[in-house]
Image (spheres, rainbow, N blue to C red):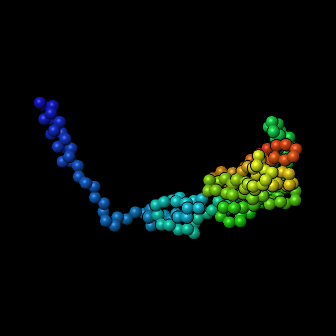
Amino acid sequence: MYRLLASMVLVMVVFAACKKAEDKVGAYDDRLSNNTYCNEPSAVNYNWGFPGKPDNSICFYPTEVFKGSFLLADSTFDVNYAFTGVRSVKITLSAADYSHMSLTGFCNDNTALAFTADKFFRASADTTILVDSVKYAGQLLCRPVDTLSGYLSRERNNDSFIRINFTIVSDTGVSYHIGTAIKQ
């Protein structure tokens, strides 16, 4: 009986000690007036710095993190991942819009390769749907018998280099191109 009475008294004391929290009307919050953030969902920095005032002039978009000229160290591997060679080539990434871009310089004839960039610092090679490429999806590369698939990636904190990872299917077999491109 004593325990029951003590428990009831304790519960009443706890409830009596509690009160509803009240916010001050018009309380000043530094974060809301001095902080701006991008409010455009397709931007890379969407909602970075929230809460604050929306300011879409500070937005940057997926293709902006890739564009520029780079020196690519391209290592080539065969279908068994045996090293077959390395080459250095100057490539240029140009934005077509906020998410589509082209890569030139990878082919000797300056063929433009199409990529679609996302806001997670990755650009995937676009796929051309052809009747004869059902087995190996990709886009036409340097020769009409070559198709390319793969991606470019970049680290969020370092814009001085990008990484490539391409698979090329041709009449002579499959090859993998893995490399790093340093911004020029």
Placement of the N terminus among the 4 image quadrants: top left
Tell me which residue sits at (48%, 60%) in the image: 50
Say whether residue 181 is visible: no
Task: Point out residue 101 in the picture as x, y percentages from the top left corner.
Answer: 72, 61
Task: Point out residue 96 in the picture as x, y percentages from the top left corner.
Answer: 71, 65
Tell me which residue sits at (84%, 51%) in the image: 146
Residue 91, quarter of the rendered image: bottom right
Q: Which of 41 and 48 is in front in this view?
A: 41
Task: Point out residue 123 in the picture as x, y percentages from the top left corner.
Answer: 69, 54
Residue lying at the far front in this picture: please name it: 131
Say whether residue 122 is visible: yes
Tell me which residue sits at (28%, 58%) in the image: 22
Task: Point out residue 53 in the picture as x, y percentages from the top left corner.
Answer: 48, 66
Q: Nearer the viewer, residue 39 or 70?
A: 39
46 with respect to 151 (left or right) = left
Placement of the C terminus among the 4 image quadrants: bottom right
Residue lying at the far left in this picture: please name it: 1
Q: Count every numbered label the image shows and give the total.
A: 0
Tell me which residue sits at (72%, 51%) in the image: 151
6 with respect to 105 (left or right) = left
